[in-house]
Amino acid sequence: MVSERKIRVRTYESDSYGHVNNACYLNYLEYGRFEFLRDIGFDYQRMLKRGYGVYVARVEINYKRPALMDDEIVIQSWPVKKGAVSGVIAQKIVRGGDIIVEAKVTWAFVDSKGVPSKLPKELDTPLLGPESA
């Protein structure tokens, strides 16, 4: 399953070259991952109420082309790996047929102290892993 979200680049996200500032892509990717979790039925609020969290452990970004002010871009997100306490979500940001960014984000499930923890069965969603996606 590939989750997709369209957004329009806002003026304040541009740098002095007229391109989207590289740090803004992290926000775009975060938004895409949160919407991916919503799409697969992961109950984020329930997780927080139970004292758990999902931390970003690693982000790999390849910048391919610049996005520009007022571009309509699409954030695509899908799972590529899932273990007992962590996994990887692949993401692309595209404009039409052009790939703007490719990324892999490693996440870790943690307890209330921020210690990596096994995902409880009641919070586990099969679509977090590629085998069910």
Image (cartoon, grey):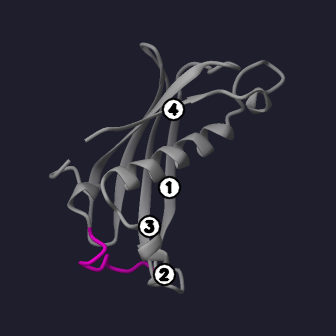
Local SS, label 1: strand
Q: Amino acid at mark 3?
A: Tyr
Magenta-colored segment: predominant secondary structure:
loop
Local SS, label 2: helix
Q: Which mark is residue 44?
A: 3
Alpha-carbon neighbours of circle 2 within 10 Å: few (<14), some, or many (≥20)?
A: few
Q: Which mark is residue 58?
A: 1
Closer to us: mark 1 or mark 3?
Answer: 3
Side (left or right) of 33 relative to 25 = left
Residue 39 part of the magenta-drawn span: no
The image position of residue 37, as x and y in percent, is 39, 55
Which of disc 3 and disc 2 is earlier in sequence? 3
Q: Amino acid at mark 1?
A: Arg
CA distance for labels 4 and 1: 13 Å
Closer to us: mark 1 or mark 2?
Answer: 2
CA distance for labels 4 and 2: 35 Å
Q: Which residue is mark 2?
A: 49
